[in-house]
Image (spheres, rainbow, N blue to C red):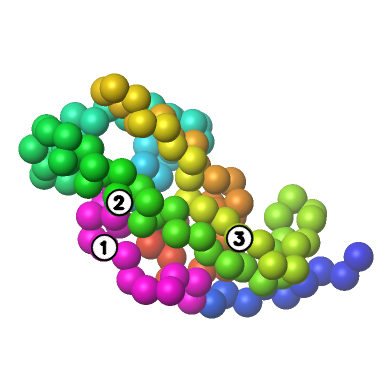
Amino acid sequence: MEAIEIKKRKLLSEPMDEKALKLARAVYNTYITYDNMEMEIKFTTFFKLLDLHPCKDSINDIIYLLEELNEPLAIKNFEFNGVTTQLKFIQFCNYKINKETVEITLSPDYMHAHLNYMLDAFLGI
């Protein structure tokens, strides 16, 4: 099987909001700290990080930022774990909103793409 040359390119259709970037970097740093792509983060942590007041509107703001991070990225000739896909759509994470926390599972595909395919990388890898 012939290896495909990976060409880094801009994958984001538009720049992300500064708060979305801050949230993404915090989630990524949590992953690095605990070496686990699955995490549960308290809303109070996000409120402090993003300088938000603890209320329902702030929770909605956090959800909006997570949705912004989850805008699908289209990657041509995506190679991961020995499998090449002609066109792959990936998202930053899966998340579940609980009463006091957010459960987040980072996408291994996204982490691989961020490191190997993105010119517009934003996590500080």
Q: Residue at the top extreme?
A: 99
The first of marks 1 and 3 along the sequence is 1
Q: Are marks 2 and 1 in contact (CB under 8 Å)?
A: yes
Find numbered disc 2 in the image and state the secondary structure of the residue it sits on. Answer: helix
Q: List the single residue furthest toward the left.
A: 53
Q: Check disc 1 and report the residue beneath it.
A: 17
Are circles 1 and 3 on residues that touch, CB within 8 Å?
no
Real-space Cα separation, disc 3 to disc 2, in angstroms: 19 Å
Q: Position of residue 53 (x, y in %)?
A: 8, 38
Q: In terms of secondary structure, where does tag 3 sit?
A: strand
Q: What residue is at 51 percent from the left and 60 percent from the top?
A: 72
Q: Quadrant of residue 97?
A: top left
The quadrant holding residue 12 is bottom left
Secondary structure of residue under mark 1: loop
Q: For the residue marked with disc 2, what is the amino acid? A: Leu
Residue 59 or residue 69, whichever sits in front: 59
Task: Give me the C-alpha separation between circle 2 and circle 1.
Answer: 8 Å
The residue that disc 3 covers is 89
For residue 86, side relative to residue 40 (left or right) = right
What residue would you read off at disc 2?
65
Q: Amino acid at mark 1?
A: Asp
- Residue type at tag 3: Phe
User: Residue 30, position in %: x, y?
Assistant: 37, 37
